[in-house]
Image (cartoon, rainbow, N blue to C red):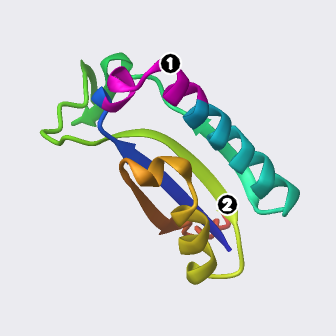
Amino acid sequence: MKYLCMVYFDPKLLATMTPSERATLDTDSMDYDKELDARGQLVVAEALQSVKTAKVVQVRKGTMSQTDGPFAETKEQLGGFILIDVQDLNAAIQVAARIPLAKYGSIEVRPIAKVERIAS
């Protein structure tokens, strides 16, 4: 079953790390991705650019709008994700607990929903 591990952390964290600490975090993260891939559990892992680069798109009454954002009043922001394929929620939680950024932020684990196509 597939699970999305959403990695949340305070973006100020990276600015407060020394270059050595940041390099270690980056290396640890990439090494963990390689480990998951070797075990056949990694589907994809990506870091996200700052929320300052985000756009929020909405369509209301047939009209599309876009705004800069998001402007959530939270300390932690979505900074990346790892899509994994493991046997169950317990296994997904174990994978999430070993994501290096879990030491600094939080990892939301959510099962991927299966959406059935409706024949037309």
Label 1 vs label 2: CA separation?
Answer: 29 Å
Residue 22 magenta-drawn?
yes
Residue 10 drawn in magenta? no
Q: Main secondary structure of the magenta part?
A: helix
Q: In this orientation, which residue lies closer to the viewer: 15 or 119? A: 15
For residue 25, which quarter of the picture? Answer: top right
In this view, 69 is above or below 105:
above
Badge 1 crowding class, 10 Å Cα cut-off, few under 14, some 14 to 19, many 20 or more, is few
Residue 47 in the image: state x and y as whole percent. 55, 33
Does 32 sit left or right of 46 as displayed?
Answer: right
Which circle marks residue 44 in the picture? none
Where residue 26 sits, quadrant-wise, is top right
Q: Earlier in the sequence, mark 1 or mark 2?
A: 1
- Relative to residue 63, is residue 88 depicted above or below? below
Instruction: Tell me residue 106's x, y (percent).
Output: 37, 55
Query: Residue at the spot x=58%, y=73% of the render?
Result: 94
Which disc number belongs to residue 84?
Answer: 2
Under tag 1, what secondary structure? helix
Disc 1 and disc 2 in contact, CB within 8 angstroms:
no
What label does residue 19 carry, if any?
1
Q: Amino acid at mark 2?
A: Ile
Horizontal side of residue 88 vs 76, given as left or right: right
Corner quadrant of residue 118: bottom right
Magenta highlight range: 13-23
